[in-house]
Amino acid sequence: MLDAIRAAREALATEHVIQPRSRGEREAMRVLLATRQGAVHASTAAINQLKALIVSAPDDLRAELRRLSRPARITRCAGLRDRPALSTEHRMTIRALRSTAQRIRHLQAEARELEHELLQLVRQQAAELRKSLGFGPITAAQILVSWSHPGRFRSEAAFASFAGVAPIPASSGLTNKHRLNRGGDRQLNRAMHTITLIRMRLDPSTKAYVARRVSEGKSPRDAQRCLKRNVCRQIFRMLERRNQPDAEGTAQAA
């Protein structure tokens, strides 16, 4: 009872009460992301199962499949035909390989279809995200799901803390440093991590930024942490301000 009273008093004293996430299109993206993730995990498990089946397969069958690339191996296994003249072990191994490979192809096709649906929703909700380097349909959808709607976070710093990219002081003695934040929304943090990796590999200005940070004495990991914080700031400003022109136009018309 005392804990509930204290929590209520703290909530009433808060200037910006946290708002629940919206439903509608955001919830549609969330369920698609969760379903696609399940398909990807199941596909990975099936691929590992296929590898194990090949390792324990009869010698001639193993020699036929082991040197192929993964896509070629899945295609070959999915098209294997029954060989009645062979032993029961050989025939049942072919049956297991074919069934597993067909399951992989089905799950991969399902993941691609869900990704296409997510891309359509992202284009409807925030097409400007897709114009920035590093924002694929999955990362953009995850950002929109976590962000939800304008005004949910009281500031850009609050959004950075929620994303787990706000640095945590880790100074000791004469050493002044920060460390990575392991809290926050880990799926959102993963999306920002993916964006920074792509930019560090493809964007000249990002490469120059990381090189400058390293020359200042930061480690490559610390430089990437700083880059995540900058990406978070860019995302927050982009999403929070995208509806402002419409609001100003409505006010002028009134």
Image (cartoon, helix red, strand yellow):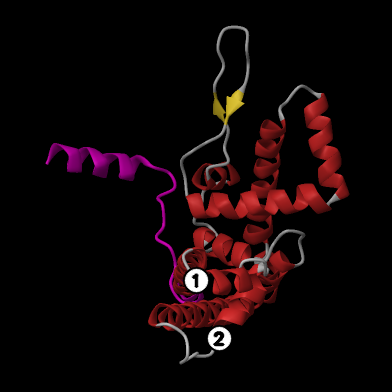
Q: Which residues are the magenta region? A: 1-29
Q: Is residue 94 above or below residue 215?
A: below
Q: Is residue 57 left or right of residue 208?
A: left
Q: Amino acid at mark 1?
A: Pro
Name the spot of residue 148 as percent of width and height, x first.
51, 63
Q: Which numbered disc flags the more N-terminal residue, 1 or 2?
A: 1
State the count of labels: 2
Query: Per the image, is 232 magenta?
Result: no
Distance (Cα) linking label 1 and label 2: 14 Å
Look at 47% across and 72% down and name the residue there.
Answer: 39
Q: Amino acid at mark 2?
A: Leu
Viewer-nearest residue: 47 or 121: 47
Look at 68% across and 54% down and name the residue there.
Answer: 195
Q: Residue furthest left?
A: 1
Name the spot of residue 181 as percent of width and height, x first.
52, 36
Task: Tell me the crowding category of disc 2: few under 14, some 14 to 19, or many 20 or more residues within 10 angstroms, Cα based.
Answer: some
Residue ID for mark 2: 80
Viewer-nearest residue: 45 or 79: 79
